[in-house]
Amino acid sequence: MMNDDDVALDPGFADRFERDKRPPCQLYLISPERYDPGFPETLKAALDAGPVAAFQLRLKGVEDMEILRAGAALKPILAAYDVAFILNDRADLAKELGADGVHLGQTDGSIAAARSLLGHDAQIGVTCHDSRHLAMEAGEAGADYVAFGAFHPTATKETSHRPDPSILSWWTTISEIPCVAIGGITPANAAPLVAAGADFLVVSSAVWTHPEGAGAGVKAFQSILEQMPAR
């Protein structure tokens, strides 16, 4: 049985339709993979520098208690800046922390199970790689956003999928559900993803390892976003 990915996506698909207006693209930060006690101040500096819509705590290879400690320290900071607090992978820990939502990979359990645990108001995002089929399934299952990528090489996570930006245009033509662009995004390569239709840019190392500090990293992205035409 064929699915959406069995037929190549026409890069010009979205050009044949008039897309509904969407809010301006926003910044979505992902934490470094290792947490250190000084990170809350780094996070404050980033949030002081410009608008951030969401922050995902993504710690790999650590005990649950370390995730809970980090989440407890960061949650009030994010709340003070009105930034959504998303936990990576673990709906159970998101529930324990009282996070705003969870981001699920393809092997992290179902949207239905996460929704049952976290409630109707939780923000549940799903990794869809370069797959239109996975995105359609996630949307039908009640995802609050779908994530495509990695669009560029990234040291943050091993990736084997490299979608074309036209998948963002396709999604925003057929669905009102927000889409997220992820993977190696920097101020130098962000504009084409925004122009293609990304509702959120997911950024990590380009902010946290910016040579002038995290605040300068956020400002660099904000400068790009402010230059983009209204959608």
Image (tube, grey):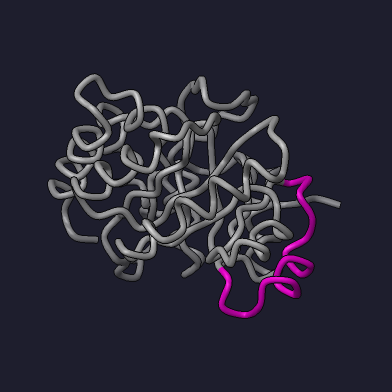
**Is residue 42 on the magenta stretch?**
no
Where residue 210 sits: x, y (%)?
A: 28, 24
**Residue 182 image position (x, y, % from top left):** 47, 39
Name, please, the residue furthest toward the right: 1
**Quarter of the figure with the C terminus:** bottom left
Residue 39 found in image quarter: top left
The structure residue drawn at horizontal position 62% and vertical position 44%, both measured from the top left corner, is: 67
Q: Is residue 210 left or right of residue 108?
A: left
Residue 111 on the magenta span: yes
Residue ranking furthest to the bottom: 120
Left or right of 218, for residue 55:
right
Observer-nearest of 95 and 129: 95
Count of numbered badges drawn on the protein = 0
Tell me residue 229's x, y (percent): 16, 53
Q: Residue at x 46, y 58 (%)?
A: 75
* Residue 83 or residue 43, whichever sits in front: 43
Q: Is residue 165 shown above or below 132?
A: above
From what the image shows, is residue 84 above or below residue 191? Answer: below
Answer with the quarter of the image where residue 123 lies: bottom right
Q: What segment carries the magenta color?
A: 106-122
Whether 105 is drawn above or below 199: the answer is: above
- Image location of residue 16, percent across then percent down: 39, 57
Compare residues 56 and 14 and report the one nearer the observer: 56
**Residue at left 71%, top 61%?**
137
Q: Nearer the viewer, residue 216 or 167?
A: 216
User: Is 49 positioned to the left or the right of 131 in the image?
Assistant: left
Query: Which residue appears at 26% of the width and 38% of the height?
Result: 191
